[in-house]
Image (spheres, grey):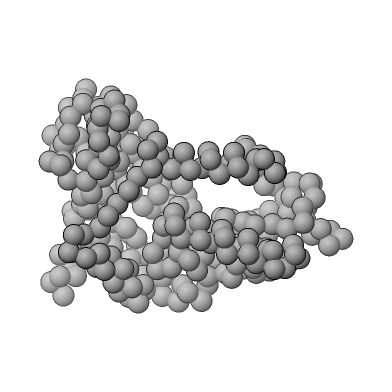
Amino acid sequence: TRTYESFFEPLMRSKFGDLRNQVSAAWLIGRIAIRSNRGLSGERLGYLRGGFQVLVDALAEAAGRDCTVRLHDPVTGISRESGEWRVNGRRYDAIISTIPPQALRHVGGPDLPPLPYQGAACLALGLDDQVTNGIYWLNMKDPGPYGAVITHTNFVPVERYDGHIVYLASYFTGDLPARADAVMRDHFCRTFGIRDSSIRWERMAVEPLAGPVFTTGYRKLIPAYQAKGFYWAGMFSPSNYPERSMEGSIAAGYAAAAELERAGGEP
């Protein structure tokens, strides 16, 4: 009990908020087992030079040789007509979705059980100085407007950037609190004794459907790679349970593509 209250409970609260009591113990044990199987030398981490945007750009370039990549073109309507799919009025043989099923229902997507999801807000700060004493990832035990302080330049050499970079990570359900970026920044400055003038720049990123919450019974809700006429590949896919990762998402993409190839594009 003491270990849970002093270690796990603060982590669960900062990660899942009001949903923490619904999180599956089986998932938590599986996650701990994965993270514990790292050997005496600990984890080996890597980071793409230039960030994951480099990978995204390369994939877009490769895909763009054989298809059309449409940016800033949100889906407003999906329908099935004469054995063909229509998305925003354009004809397609098949649909692969990488977003949770419930996000498509209002535009004509299939009726699948909604997956429990939560939002994420990440405030990135550019600083003059290093403020976490060489620590890369610092989880916050006390309640606050963010759950983790991640000093990116304690992992990737600061020489690659113009100054130090810190991420403040926060999760939420429902609506993001008002002025969340200002509240996070002010709390960070007070907690770590940082002058506001030492912050060179700041950028706030918010995603209302950032990732699934692995509640009790979650595995029964995971859609197959082919379900209700759609092909599915995302953070909610079987390859991303119990550990979510870029690798798991890429594996889901390959699995969905294999299903599509086997079916010959049929729903």
Percent x, y of residue 108: 71, 57
Q: Is residue 84 left or right of residue 169?
A: right
Camera-side residue: 260 or 144? 260
Q: Position of residue 69 (x, y in %)?
A: 65, 40
Q: Tell me the residue at 17%/68% (across/down).
A: 5
Q: Nearer the viewer, residue 35 or 12?
A: 35
Rendered location of residue 30, percent (x, y): 33, 73
Asked if 246 appears above or below 236 in the picture, the reply is: above
Q: Is any part of residue 145 visible from this angle?
A: no
> In the visual, does 142 lie left or right of 67?
left
- Classify 38 as above or below 47: below
Find residue 264 and report its image quarter: bottom right
Q: Residue at x 48, y 43 (%)?
A: 55
Give the residue displayed 15% in from the left and 42% down from the top: 134
Say left or right for 211 vs 45.
right
- Work out which quarter of the rendered image holds the C terminus and state it: bottom right
Q: Position of residue 106 (x, y in %)?
A: 66, 55
